[in-house]
Image (cartoon, helix red, strand yellow):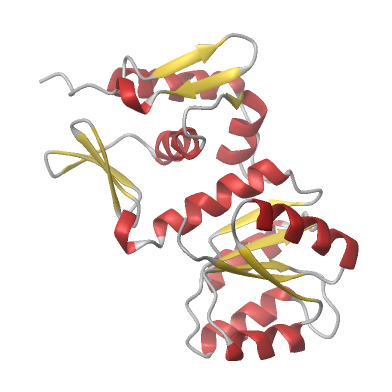
């Protein structure tokens, strides 16, 4: 893994320590700030690959902190970690430029998967992922065949991205639901099966249904698409 630095802005010291320990085990270098003033100092002193910001913070909230960084020209990708449930906060964060949200209590494995997805989208070296006769453009979040964009749907793309991020390990149905639907949307097992069926049409030998558990994607089984 390239040298990737994460700035964690979280005022709960115990939770921040838990997150930092986990992310360091995942191979990231983590710097922790407990309030926005400290976060600003660290942002100006160093460059980071990713920000993880809580929203409810002392002095000012994480939304305003992120807004000020954006206004100063900082384009570092950010994921919000929040206990808030109101739709207005979510929309405000995305309006500023947040990449993603995770609701507290945070599932650490889901956090790791979402971080990988965000960093992959922002990595010039991995801007395109070739899968047999298809290409995933991680910047536009499109699936292409012979240079033409396929209309697979956003959630099908997100599901493919999630399965790939687990590198051949089983992804549970619960994790798929959390990844594809935000907190203000209603998850659907039936819809998951529909999206899996669409992926199987694209990659008939690569998608495995692990009965009662979830799904696994075998990248080594990808063949050329049917003409």
Farthest top residue in view: 211
Q: Position of residue 185 (x, y in %)?
A: 64, 41
Identity of the residue drawn at 49% across and 22% down = 216
**Vertical arrangement, residue 66 with respect to residue 168, above or below:** below
Q: Position of residue 79 (x, y in %)?
A: 61, 62
Q: Is residue 149 left or right of residue 63?
A: left
Near-viewer residue (186 or 155): 155
Quadrant assignment, res 93: bottom right
Identity of the residue drawn at 13% across and 44% down = 147
What is the quadrant of the C terminus in the image?
A: top left
Q: Is residue 227 left or right of residue 218?
A: left
Q: Position of residue 172 (x, y in %)?
A: 62, 25
Q: Position of residue 157 (x, y in %)?
A: 40, 38
**Vertical arrangement, residue 205 with respect to residue 164, above or below:** above
Near-viewer residue (68 or 223): 223
Identity of the residue drawn at 48% across and 32% down = 163
Quadrant assignment, res 223: top left
**Vertical arrangement, residue 96 with respect to residue 38, above or below:** above
Q: What is the tally of numbered marks visible in this picture?
A: 0
**Vertical arrangement, residue 176 with respect to residue 61, above or below:** above
């Amino acid at each position: 893994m390239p040298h990737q630095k994460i700035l964690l802005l979280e005022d709960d010291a115990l939770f921040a320590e838990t997150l930092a320990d986990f992310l360091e085990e995942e191979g990231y270098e983590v710097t922790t700030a407990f309030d926005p003033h400290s976060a600003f100092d660290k942002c100006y002193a160093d460059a980071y690959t990713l920000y993880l910001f809580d929203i409810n913070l002392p002095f000012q909230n994480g939304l305003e902190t992120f807004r000020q960084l954006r206004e100063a020209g900082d384009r570092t990708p950010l994921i919000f970690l929040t206990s808030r449930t109101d739709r207005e906060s979510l929309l405000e964060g995305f309006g500023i430029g947040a990449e993603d949200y995770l609701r507290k209590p945070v599932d650490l494995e889901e956090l790791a998967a979402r971080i990988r997805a965000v960093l992959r989208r922002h990595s010039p070296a991995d801007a395109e992922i070739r899968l047999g006769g298809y290409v995933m453009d991680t910047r536009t979040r499109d699936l292409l065949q012979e240079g033409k964009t396929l209309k697979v749907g956003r959630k099908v793309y997100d599901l493919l991205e999630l399965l790939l991020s687990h590198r051949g390990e089983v992804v549970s149905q619960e994790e798929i639901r959390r990844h594809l639907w935000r907190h203000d949307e209603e998850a659907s097992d039936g819809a998951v099966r529909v999206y899996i069926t669409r992926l199987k049409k694209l990659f008939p030998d690569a998608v495995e249904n692990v009965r009662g558990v979830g799904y696994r994607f075998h990248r080594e089984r990808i063949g050329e698409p049917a003409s």
